[in-house]
Amino acid sequence: MAKGNQFVKEIADIEQDFPQWYTDVILKTQLVDYGPVKGTMVIRPYGYAIWENIQSELNKRFKKAGAKNAYFPLLIPESYLKKEAEHVEGFAPEVAVVTHAGGAKLQEPLIIRPTSETIICDMYAKWMESYRDLPIIINQWANVMRWEKTTRPFLRTSEFLWQEGHTVHASHEEAEEKTQEMLNVYKDFAENCLAIPVLTGRKTDKEKFAGAVATYGMEAMMLDGKSLQAGTSHYLGQNFAKSFNMKFLDKDGALKYGYSTSWGVSTRLIGALIMAHGDQRGLVIPPVVAPIQVVIIPVCMHKEGVLEKAQELCNMFEDAGLRVELDKRDATPGWKFNEWEMKGVPVRIEVGPRDIENGKMMVMRRDTLVKQEYALGDVDGIKELLDVVQKEMLTKSRERRDAKIKWASNLEEILEAVETKNFVKAPWCGDRACEDAIKEFSQASARIISEDCADNKNCAVCGKKAQKIVVFARAY
Amino acid sequence: MAKGNQFVKEIADIEQDFPQWYTDVILKTQLVDYGPVKGTMVIRPYGYAIWENIQSELNKRFKKAGAKNAYFPLLIPESYLKKEAEHVEGFAPEVAVVTHAGGAKLQEPLIIRPTSETIICDMYAKWMESYRDLPIIINQWANVMRWEKTTRPFLRTSEFLWQEGHTVHASHEEAEEKTQEMLNVYKDFAENCLAIPVLTGRKTDKEKFAGAVATYGMEAMMLDGKSLQAGTSHYLGQNFAKSFNMKFLDKDGALKYGYSTSWGVSTRLIGALIMAHGDQRGLVIPPVVAPIQVVIIPVCMHKEGVLEKAQELCNMFEDAGLRVELDKRDATPGWKFNEWEMKGVPVRIEVGPRDIENGKMMVMRRDTLVKQEYALGDVDGIKELLDVVQKEMLTKSRERRDAKIKWASNLEEILEAVETKNFVKAPWCGDRACEDAIKEFSQASARIISEDCADNKNCAVCGKKAQKIVVFARAY
């Protein structure tokens, strides 16, 4: 095990004060900073590099799902928001409004997109004529704005970055299938890239997207037992099609409304990553999305041949397609060890004069803090190690998470479970009143409807016959 | 030569009505559409794919220049804009203003960034303490907004996408060097990726960025002889450093203001591409940034083995790293030829039963419309061809451009030259009044100050001793 990390002292105790730990870590590792306008964030290079890796991995998967990227305008006429009744009710309270531009008052106020269903459906209506034009499968990477009262970098900010996919189909079966397909894309991505196990399933009506027929979400457990909604996929039925006159001429010669979907993940995922894997030393970033996968730290840097050898190693790793950094700064190896541990770099390599002499290098895994010797320049070995780290981080997270999903059959058990940092599975009759009662009593909300069988079970609140098993948790 | 293209009829004559030709081409090829708010555009998948290729090529070059990507907030407090006197004068008339958010009036209005010097310098001031923190070299990919009276998709829109690099240095020499370095990065990119030859040089004071000490621009000649400013690099001196208190502790123990630069290119580049290379059939896209580099069109598609072979070819090209599309749509080969010509795909491959029998494929270059037979599946041959196309497009553009740079020694000659679609080199005394007179008389503005020697030359307007040779042109 590595010796104690000096930065540990400067980071709040992860067990005692998780929110402060989060703030300390994100600021000290320079992932992010506060912007001058309340609720905004500046994503600094180290944080943005994670986002770029997330984008690259998702783009690969979106392409396989037939999606192409495009870009729609930031500003939406206020009247558009009002066309879909539920949608305006959900989003109107949190929009930012442009009233003046070019030195004059605008005739119609414009809102900064909180999400783009309205403007995108308006364009699709223009583009689709016949069934031959369907499906339309387009994704956009963009900034959106939702004016929130309580904000925290990555988790909830007035402006955030995200992707939003929007599709239209000729049949509701096809649209529902796409909704599920994209939910599974997210699940695959969360588990295999972020190493975060997720629960997926339909949301209750209370928790669904404003304007959707059905919302499916994926929920990730954070280290404090709270849930973070890490992505959603919505089946919109013909709701937006009817509001925006999104019609097509079908094979049978009839003019029909299309069926649409939308799905998105955001810079929240960076918050998820931090709170799913961190420890007292700081970040632990899974290799697939790590800005730097391997850091090389020369020991006795000024001894002849050390820096040269370290640079040679660095070039070898780079040529092998790894994201590697050689830390040549004028500081002690110990200080560097601590800093890179805090920054969560998955693998650290130390190279000193003795290592070079013996043809060895000392390698440390950030996730386990275990050290092991490798042959100097064993690129394949390090690549394998990164794969192992990626997989074991998921396994470890899954085991931890699975051990913290409890069953409850009444309000007290639900409260007890969430107080001890668990997710709770509880039977539910389907009534909004009972869902509200659970929230009121335990501050736990319905995260997803699970696939578990509710037969012979009774609602945890009213005792009537249960319709569903629901996963409840306190949530970000 | 290929036979006449049916779409030709539907596109305005490129010689007679270039602006209408532009509009017809961008809409018919589905690069872009008009957004619902005046002056906004929707970048459709075919257009956005060009932008993604531009981003990827620039990111490679920025990384070599030491830049890291980050993201700063969209909304800037109005008071920030006012901190740099020239800057506010230049941008205040065209900003969009958010006055309400979250259902309430804001205490201070917020502007949507027209450019981010102010907010970025504010953050840098917070981040930099000592000379060890310098230089800071950060780039951001973002949307910006400038409320323009006359707009045209890609060329001038109220919202556009761009990158803006912002650096701070400890010395003015280093900052000036970075300004030049980035200008050269843009030039290299424009020439080798977009196949557009550019003139680079310093801008006159009249044309410089609001708040800069010096602006350097690159200017590209469009097919109608007009110039398009395709990128700029600004040396900002200590102007923003002083307005935003951007100080650092230097090696000598003194607290000093930093020297900053900024540099940007935007979705305008897509407009440049179209107007530099198009022809009567539509787009001609250089291979490096083409969304589809090779299109495969099966002939007698329903004959046994044709589609299978075409798919096999498609997979081979894809595996070789090319962006390739197999057009399996239910339409005639002739119709497909025409459509892909209009869309500017650099290389088209036809495969029919006879070709398969003879082990051949017919290949057409979009830029020259020349057809040539290749061995079936000759991936290397096609890769070489794409390189040749890329290089020859630049050569052809450069020859055309060079033949259209004329010298003029008085106002009449300047007018005559720009009327006949040329750039003009003219001697200039350095007075704003003479620059204004040229604009007034010929509608040509000073594009860049050239490196040509002005000795023994007299100003084209006042006849006094010339200080500089300036390139004048009508401009987008």
Image (tube, coloured by chain):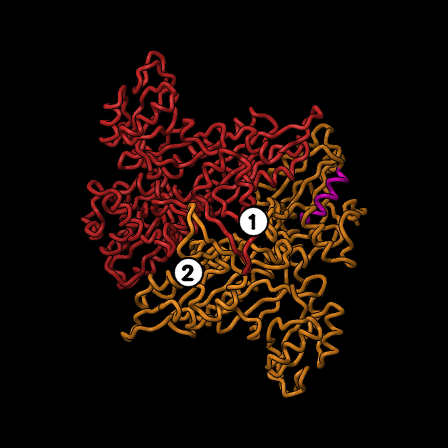
Chain colours: A orange, B red
Q: In this view, does B195 lie above or below B332?
A: above
Considering depth in this image, is B59 or A392 the residue closer to the camera?
A: B59
Residue B62 drawn at (x, y percent): 51, 38
The answer to whether residue A340 is magenta is: yes
Q: Mark 1 points at which residue?
A: B108
Q: Main secondary structure of the magenta part?
A: helix
Q: Is residue A324 above or below residue A276?
A: above
Residue A110 drawn at (x, y percent): 44, 56
| Magenta residues, start to end | A333-346
| Residue A302 in view, yes or no | yes
Disc sitting over residue A119 in the figure? 2
Considering depth in this image, is B318 or A167 the residue closer to the camera?
A: A167
Q: Chain letter of disc 2? A: A
Picture quadrant where residue B285 is located: top left
CA neighbours of label 2 inside 10 A, class few (<14), some (14 to 19), many (20+): many
Q: In which quarter of the image is the C terminus of chain B?
A: top left
* Comparing labels 1 and 2, the label whose residue is closer to the camera: 1
Mark 2 falls on what kind of element?
helix
Q: In this view, does A418 lie to the left or right of A449?
A: right
Q: Do labels 1 and 2 share a chain?
A: no
Q: Chain letter of disc 1? A: B
Name the amino acid, label 1. Glu
Picture quadrant where residue A416 is located: bottom right
Give me the residue at 30% from left, 44% from top.
Answer: B284
Q: In this view, does B468 lie above or below A126?
A: above
Mark 1 falls on what kind of element?
strand
